[in-house]
Amino acid sequence: MDGMSTEPAAEPRWLSDEEQYAWQSYLHATTLLEDHLDRQLQRDAGMPHVYYGLLVQLSRAPRRRMRMTELAQNAKITRSRLSHAIARLEKNGWVRRENCPSDKRGQLAHLTDEGMHVLEKAAPGHVAAVRGALFDRLSPEQVGQLAEICRVMADGLQPKGADLPWLR
């Protein structure tokens, strides 16, 4: 036996017209939103949206320090991409790498005072951009629905034991 099945492949479950409309609307809106936020942060703070997210994560961590592996998981980026981003943030003086005292192989990312200052300066413009692009356009009920929809999607896309790039 060559391992090939002789049964016909199941017909794909194509999207209904309503599902196709929702899917295309989602793709269009998320692409526009990410581009809008990235351009705002590049213009006003000289950094891409992903770097801003890393600074926010570090600002919320105890003593503004976090293990690199945990930071990659929280940011949903690969360790390689995180390493590149941290190198750029280090070059700007906003982040410093430190050896992990409890694990010789581990490294911590530490948000410097200069990085915290940059984040505090960038935050008002970023919040205004998020509000203007998203929350000011939604009713309180829609905000709750958006949160629930995103939570359901995220839960389904990262089940326990999943082989996700940022967990490797």
Image: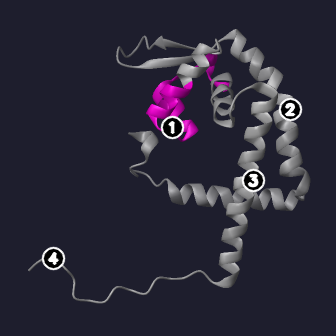
- Amino acid type of disc 3? Leu
Q: Residue at x 66, y 70 (%)?
A: 23
Q: Residue at x 51, y 37 (%)?
A: 73
> Are the residues flagged by discs 3 and 1 in contact, CB closer than 8 Å?
no
Q: CA distance from mark 3 to mark 1?
A: 25 Å
The stretch of residues the image draws in magenta is 60-85
- Amino acid type of disc 2? Gly
- Amino acid type of disc 4? Gly
Is residue 75 rendered magenta in the image? yes
| Residue that badge 2 annotates | 125
| Residue that badge 1 annotates | 73
Q: CA distance from mark 2 to mark 3?
A: 18 Å
Where does the image place residue 109, in percent across and percent down from the top left?
Answer: 54, 19
Q: Is residue 93 above or below residue 151?
A: above
Q: Earlier in the sequence, mark 2 or mark 4?
A: 4
Q: Secondary structure at mark 3?
A: helix
Q: Earlier in the sequence, mark 2 or mark 3?
A: 3
Q: CA distance from mark 1 to mark 4?
A: 38 Å
Q: Residues within 10 Å of mark 2 (few under 14, many from 20)?
A: some
Q: CA distance from mark 2 to mark 4?
A: 58 Å
Residue nearest the viewer, comparing 72 with 122: 122
Q: Residue at x 83, y 51 (%)?
A: 134
Q: Secondary structure at mark 4?
A: loop
Q: Which mark is residue 32?
A: 3
- Amino acid type of disc 1? Gln
Is residue 35 rendered magenta in the image? no
Q: CA distance from mark 2 to mark 1?
A: 26 Å
Where does the image place residue 6, in percent across and percent down from the top left?
Answer: 22, 88
Name the quarter where the N terminus is drawn. Answer: bottom left
